[in-house]
Image (cartoon, rainbow, N blue to C red):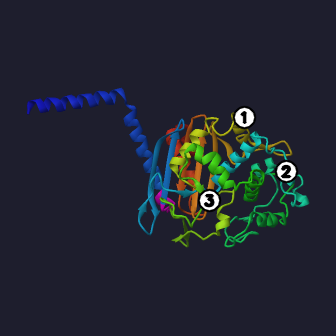
């Protein structure tokens, strides 16, 4: 018995020494617990069924977890591998594909899009590829001013071919002259998807799979399909008069456009984030162009690049984007100088969930200066 007691005392002593030698372990646990508290509080406050969270530092995951339910009816919990929809966060992949073609000399940023769309109306004559990437083309958003399902020139319950959509878009009046203003336009990115197809001969989703997802090992990322059996797929929800309802149905073709129609998860976006610190996909000069605020015709800048918002949070450079579609929202926030990235997924519609607020709150735990900015 005495020998056992001595052994236990030795173990306790070694553990204590380890704790002194590596106090970061306790600190990390405390930080992780604080993140859990913040996210769970937002889960309750925003009445979100489920949240997926990923935190990466230097391209490596330091926290990946799920909160709440991926499927309310089956009482299935969210896990890090749970698959959510990206909404407009998918635009950064479309923009990356375009830049790959630019690097290969297959198209130019200042090419007039009429080069690839000879059927385009005269109003598009001055629109360039760069204008589409930066939401400065003047081509109106096909979803209408509110960009909600069922509004605008496109019926979200109807299937369309790519040529059908281009023809519909061609008939819409321009919002302004190209380069004159910045106004978010999903239409521009749908057109970019068609452009990729016309230049490469491949559906843009296949191009993304071959050139981005497969090389990076993003095995859970793909174009939306509600027909296929997809393990770990999360269900999207909306609140209607305070009552939780299933997501609205969208026609299959409109769930495959390049303005943001992807499935992915926390683990895959960690691989994406890591790749953005390297030249695996694009040269640094190309990324620099993507992450530079667009210059308007009057010489002023707007804080948007190619598929990325380009911002600053209390002196910390931030590349970020929101996404919302079919009962899902998400946010990716890359504090690039701090090499910290926060990814937040929710399975609740855009009218009721604020993933960017959750991402900011989590980031402030890792970068205390951001908390000061939030209070201001």
Q: Nearer the viewer, mark 2 or mark 1?
A: 1
Which element carries disc 3, helix, strand or loop? strand
Q: Name the foreground residue: 252 vs 242.
A: 252
Q: Nearer the viewer, mark 3 or mark 1?
A: 1
Q: Earlier in the sequence, mark 3 or mark 2?
A: 2
Which element carries disc 2, helix, strand or loop? loop
Q: CA distance from mark 2 to mark 1?
A: 26 Å
- The circle on residue 324 is 3
**One can see residue 373 in this view:** no
The image shows residue 177 at horizontal and vertical percentages of 87, 54
The image shows residue 292 at horizontal and vertical percentages of 73, 40
Q: CA distance from mark 3 to mark 1?
A: 30 Å
Q: Name the foreground residue: 191 vs 318.
A: 191
Q: Nearer the viewer, mark 3 or mark 2?
A: 3
Q: Residue at x 48, y 56 (%)?
A: 82
The image shows residue 202 at horizontal and vertical percentages of 71, 54
Give the residue number, with chain letter if any, for mark 2: 180
Q: Start and end of the magenta stretch?
A: 43-49
Q: Residue at x 57, y 45 (%)?
A: 374
Which residue is situated farthest in the front direction here? 201
- The circle on residue 285 is 1
Which residue is situated farthest in the right direction here? 122
Q: Residue at x 75, y 49 (%)?
A: 133
């Amino acid at each position: 018995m005495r020998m056992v007691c001595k052994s236990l005392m030795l173990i306790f002593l070694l553990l204590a020494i380890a704790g002194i030698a590596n106090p970061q372990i306790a600190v990390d646990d405390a930080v992780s617990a604080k993140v859990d508290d913040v996210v769970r509080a937002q889960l309750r406050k925003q009445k979100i069924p489920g949240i997926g969270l990923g935190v990466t530092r230097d391209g490596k995951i330091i926290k990946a977890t799920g909160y709440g339910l991926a499927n309310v009816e089956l009482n299935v919990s969210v896990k890090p591998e749970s698959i959510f929809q990206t909404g407009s966060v998918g635009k950064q992949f479309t923009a990356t594909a375009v830049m790959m073609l630019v690097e290969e000399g297959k198209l130019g940023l200042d090419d007039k899009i009429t080069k690839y769309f000879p059927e385009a109306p005269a109003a598009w004559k001055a629109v360039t590829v760069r204008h589409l990437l930066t939401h400065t083309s003047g081509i109106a958003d096909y979803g209408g001013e509110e960009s909600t399902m069922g509004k605008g020139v496109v019926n979200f319950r109807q299937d369309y071919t790519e040529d059908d959509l281009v023809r519909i878009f061609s008939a819409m009046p321009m919002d302004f002259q190209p380069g004159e203003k910045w106004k978010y336009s999903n239409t521009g990115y749908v057109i970019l998807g068609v452009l990729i197809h016309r230049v490469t001969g491949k559906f843009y989703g296949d191009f993304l799979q071959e050139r981005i997802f497969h090389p990076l090992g993003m095995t859970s990322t793909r174009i939306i399909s509600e027909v296929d059996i997809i393990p770990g797929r999360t269900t999207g929800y909306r609140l209607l008069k305070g009552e939780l309802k299933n997501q609205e149905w969208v026609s299959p073709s409109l769930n495959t456009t390049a303005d943001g129609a992807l499935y992915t998860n926390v683990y895959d976006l960690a691989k994406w984030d890591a790749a953005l610190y390297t030249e695996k996909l694009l040269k640094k000069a190309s990324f620099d162009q993507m992450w530079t605020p667009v210059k308007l015709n009057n010489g002023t800048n707007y804080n948007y690049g190619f598929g990325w918002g380009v911002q600053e949070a209390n002196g910390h450079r931030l590349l970020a984007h929101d996404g919302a579609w079919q009962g899902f929202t998400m946010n990716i926030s890359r504090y690039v100088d701090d090499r910290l990235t926060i990814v937040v997924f929710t399975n609740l519609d855009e009218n009721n969930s604020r993933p960017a607020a959750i991402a900011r709150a989590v980031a402030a735990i890792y970068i205390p200066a951001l908390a000061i900015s939030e209070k201001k």
